[in-house]
């Protein structure tokens, strides 16, 4: 009796060990269980963080997230593109596992999703046409002017909190699906200023006939977004982030995309 008991325990131990080994192998191979994979979502049109170049998705966030995932046990399965204000629903609906979109960590978003440690800091910039026709130096100089920003962004939040009702009417605010469209409308004269994150403002100013009129300090910090219940990916990405900061990859990518 006791011999049978012992051999049954040994059998279970062996099978248990084999099962674990098989599932680990299955997850690390391609098409493995989705608990060990990462599908990322972004919103291109936010250079140099994410943009389309000749049909390809490129940018600092693209390189950084892929380098960070490389440091983890997760396998990277690719990118999905959304409008910025659809990213949080895409994450909470499980369409994607991580948001990498220059997304500012703030209390409102923190109620719905979680963030990794911050990986970049930014303020807002007020961008105007480069022809010198309008050169505001402060928010009050934007009085009665049509202003643009991207839907669902913190730049839109500044327009709503600081300008609408004070300096401009609701109708003078133009919300765009992408900052590329907002900058185009600025060039066309349909808006007189665009509220946008500083590094993105500098990139547009370097490549298009627009310039930064002044900056508005918000002290924002960008993080990767993860589901609130997904402690495993949050921890893995934070460890990956520290690793790329320590091994020089982060600095190389900052140099590549910002010349910093
Ligand atoms: N940092 C701003 C925010 O979190 C703007 C981000 C826009 N990102 C983008 N990929 N279009 O609201």
Image: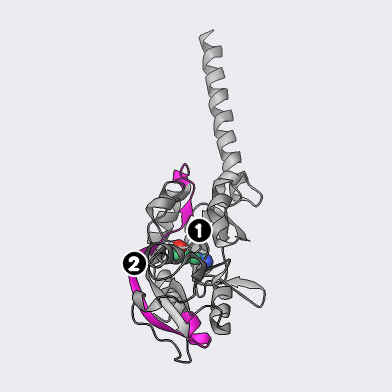
Q: Which residue is mark 1?
A: 69
Find residue 243 and report its horizontal and vertical position in percent: 40, 61
What element does badge 2 sit on? Answer: strand
Residue 57 inside the magenta-drawn segment: no
Q: In terms of depth relative to the viewer, which is nearer, 162 or 33?
A: 162
Left or right: 213 in relation to 96: left
- The residue at the point 42 percent across, 46 percent down is 111
Label 2 crowd (10 A; few <14 / some 14-19 / many >=20) = some
**Relative to 212, residue 50 above or below:** above
Marks 2 and 1, how far apart at CA: 29 Å
Find residue 165 and report its horizontal and vertical position in percent: 41, 64
| Span of residues in magenta | 203-232
Q: Earlier in the sequence, mark 2 or mark 1?
A: 1
Label 1 crowd (10 A; few <14 / some 14-19 / many >=20) = many
Of all residues shown, which one is farthest toward the top? 1
Q: Quadrant of residue 137?
A: bottom left
- The residue at the point 33 percent across, 78 percent down is 138
Of all residues shown, which one is farthest toward the bottom? 131
Find residue 249 and report its horizontal and vertical position in percent: 43, 70
| Quadrant occupied by the N terminus | top right
Rendered image: mark on residue 218: 2
């Amino acid at each position: 009796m006791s011999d049978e008991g012992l051999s049954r325990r040994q059998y279970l131990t062996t099978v248990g060990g084999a099962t674990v080994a098989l599932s680990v192998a299955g997850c690390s191979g391609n098409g493995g269980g989705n608990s060990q994979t990462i599908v990322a979502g972004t919103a291109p049109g936010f250079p140099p963080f994410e943009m389309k170049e000749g049909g390809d998705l490129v940018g600092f966030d693209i390189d950084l997230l892929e380098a960070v995932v490389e440091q983890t046990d997760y396998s990277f399965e690719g990118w999905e593109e959304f409008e910025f204000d659809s990213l949080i629903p895409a994450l909470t609906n499980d369409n994607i596992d991580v948001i990498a979109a220059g997304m500012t960590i703030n209390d409102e978003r923190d109620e719905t999703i979680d963030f990794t440690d911050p990986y970049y800091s930014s303020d807002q910039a007020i961008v105007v046409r480069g022809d010198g026709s309008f050169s505001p130096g402060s928010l009050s100089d934007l009085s009665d002017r049509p202003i643009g920003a991207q839907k669902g962004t913190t730049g839109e939040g500044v327009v709503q909190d600081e300008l609408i009702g004070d300096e401009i009417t609701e109708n003078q605010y133009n919300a765009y699906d992408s900052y590329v469209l907002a900058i185009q409308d600025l060039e066309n004269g349909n808006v007189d200023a665009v509220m946008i994150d500083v590094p993105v403002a500098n990139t547009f100013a370097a490549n298009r006939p627009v310039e930064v009129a002044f900056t508005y300090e918000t002290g924002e910090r960008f993080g990767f977004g993860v589901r609130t219940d997904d402690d495993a990916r949050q921890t893995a990405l934070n460890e990956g982030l520290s690793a790329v900061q320590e091994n020089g990859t982060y600095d190389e990518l900052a140099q590549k995309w910002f010349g910093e």
